[in-house]
Each structure stands twice: as structure tokens, then as C-alpha cells.
Amino acid sequence: MVNLSSGARYYLWREPVDMRKSFDGLQGVVTNEIKRPALSGEVFIFLNRRRDQVKMLVWDRSGFVIYYKRLERGRFELPQLKEERRGQVLPWADLMLILEGVSLTSVRWRKRYKAFDGQSSAGA
């Protein structure tokens, strides 16, 4: 069962993928292009050229699972990047917004708790 939780790590492949690819074809993109271990439990996200279909590939301890969604209208929005990379880590919150059709450019994020990173001074 696919668990799309905030605890998982998500990788978005920004180049269009032929949606006829199944487990082995998508696993090939993961290992040969993204350079990540396909059996890691990370979720790998692929879109077609029109961006109206998405496939997510994940290993779930006993085999691969593919989550596949096709939109009847509209397109999935890609996040804007500062640097152009074909594969990138995608925050869970951004993935949920993309899947639900929320425009990423219009989202206003409010300040929330941030874990201590060990680099800040105690008096700051």
C-alpha cells in the first residue's frame, strides 16, 4: 500500500516520461537517470508530456507499487526551480498541492516551527 506521508522522501523527475512505462521502465529511470536506489522506499514521481498524468513508483518492502492518476481536465503544475535539474527532491506539502490542483505560485506559506539545525546561536 502506498503511504504518501510527510515522513517519506519524494523525487520529482522533471522530464516527460512515456506513461506506457511500467515497473521495470520506471525503475530504469530511477537507477540510471536519477541515480537513486529504487529499493530505498523513496517515492519517485513521473509526469507525461501534457502533464495530465502522473505515476509514482515506490518499493514497499515486498515489491514495487505504482500510483497512477489521470486528470480529466487541467494539468499538473511543476514547481519553479532556482537551478534547472532533471531530478529534484520535492517536499510532501508541494506534492499534495500539485495532486489537488492548487497553484504553487499563489500559495502563501505561514511561518511554522523549524527544528534546531545546530548552527544558530543560543541567544538569537
Image (spheres, helix red, strand yellow):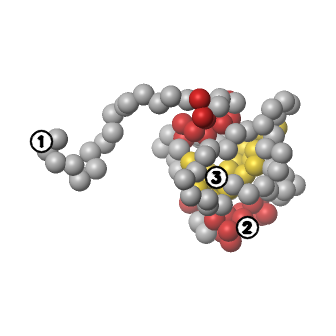
Q: Residues within 10 Å of mark 1 (few under 14, many from 20)?
A: few
Label 1's element? loop
Image vertical order of residue 4 relative to residue 17, above or below:
above
**Residue ID for mark 2:** 28
Q: Position of residue 108 (x, y in %)?
A: 50, 28
Residues 65 and 123: in front is 123
**Residue ID for mark 3:** 12
Q: Position of residue 8 (x, y in %)?
A: 52, 47
> Taking 110 as reference, is 1 left or right?
right
Callout 2, which amino acid?
Answer: Gly
> Taking 97 as reference, is 20 left or right?
right
Image vertical order of residue 17 relative to residue 52, above or below:
below
Which quarter of the figure has residue 3? top right
Which quarter of the figure has residue 29? bottom right
Image vertical order of residue 56 relative to residue 97, above or below:
below
Image vertical order of residue 23 relative to residue 91, above or below:
below
Choose the circle earlier in sequence order: 2 or 1. 2
Residues 19 and 62: in front is 19
Q: Which mark is residue 123?
A: 1
What is the distance, in whole Å, between disc 2 and disc 1 at their CAs?
49 Å
Number of the front mark, 1 or 3 = 1
Q: Residues within 10 Å of mark 3 (few under 14, many from 20)?
A: many
Residue at position x 57%, y 39% from top?
A: 94
Look at the image and tell me in which quarter the C terminus lies.
top left
Residues 10 and 105: in front is 105
Label 3's element? strand
What is the distance, in whole Å, between disc 3 and disc 2 at their CAs?
15 Å
Residue at position x 73%, y 67% from top?
A: 28
Residue 78 appears anywhere in the view:
yes
Residue at position x 68%, y 68% from top?
A: 33
